[in-house]
Amino acid sequence: MILVCPSCDTRYFADDSKIGREGRRVRCATCGHAWTAKAQEEDGAPAPVEETGLTREQVERLRQTAQANSKTRAGPHAEFRAQQHAKRKRDRSRAATIAWVSVAIVFAGVLGAAVLFRNEVANAFPKAASLYQLVGLDVNRFGLTLENVEAKRSFDGTTPVLTVTGSAINKGDEAQPTPQLRVTLKDESGKEVQTWTDEFAVASLAPGERTEFTTRFEAPPVETYRLTVTFAEKDGGDIGAETQIEAPADPAHAGEGGDHGAPAATHETAAPEAAAADGHAPAPAPAHAPAPVPAHAPEPATEAAHH
């Protein structure tokens, strides 16, 4: 075959077998230009190139085959990844469930302890007693209960005297210090008009122990009043729930010739609340005209007169 240099048109004779069907890199000996020589037909035309194009159907078959092979090769790995993903999802769900159950158990434990030890909680945080009462739970912050509370009006000579008697009992399992006794006079609208405090005869009460009390107030108002009796902190702090005693109208107004004496009060005791039992009992009002009375007997050791 004849090779022609594209640069200087120098011609060369070459053996077809040395060029080959794929061509060969040659260099011009005259100008040094290098090019790729292709095999030619006898008339000098380049040798026809073998058709290598693929039809659309062939391409689609090859693509599908490649996808199938890919799925076959990736199958175990994809399945393993799916299993791991499902396992992680189950683990997260299990962890969330355990967390919520733990929170619920802790909350239930705290709530149960707050209910079971509500007296101790109220003693440490006095304002918590009102929260317990809002949800209907009784709180005995002082650990003592008032019982048999009664009030009566009498005269010490010509001086009217209001006497309140009753007892305090420790129904708990531990010894409790005795607080102050607080007595309050209220008008019919519930407004406080007079308050006094008194001390118990003992400093503390052992479990199941009881102490009686008597406290007096001289020259109380003659109008109809409501008495409330409760425990109070000795430093003037919070007080417990009240034992209420309703005072009826003056019996002297019940009718002509009525008794002008001072009848004793009756008492009804209810269940204890924060630091006292709530009860209601009528306390008689004094007569408007004092009657002569015999010499006044000595008051009990726990009695305190207040002016």
Image (cartoon, rainbow, N blue to C red):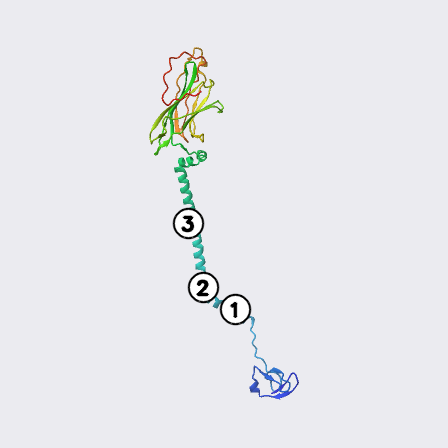
For residue 98, which numbered disc appears in the image?
3
- Residue 281: percent from the left, percent from the top? 41, 22
Hey, what amino acid is under mark 3?
A: Ile
Above or below residue 244? Residue 295 is above
Residue toward you, 74 or 118:
118
Q: Are marks 2 and 3 in contact (CB under 8 Å)?
A: no
Please tell me whether mark 1 sits on a helix, a strand or a loop. helix
The furthest residue to the right? 8
**Left or right of residue 225: residue 14:** right
Q: Residues within 10 Å of mark 1 (few under 14, many from 20)?
A: few
Hey, what amino acid is under mark 2? His
For disc 2, the neighbor class at 10 Å (few under 14, some 14 to 19, many from 20) is few
Q: State which tag comes first along the sequence, 2 or 1.
A: 1
Please tell me whether mark 2 sits on a helix, a strand or a loop: helix
Discs 2/1, front: 2
Front residue of 258 and 301: 301
Q: Residue at x 56, y 86 (%)?
A: 18
Q: Residue under circle 2?
A: 77
Q: Nearer the viewer, residue 86 or 178?
A: 178
Q: Which residue is mark 1?
A: 63
- Residue 74 showing in the rendered view: yes
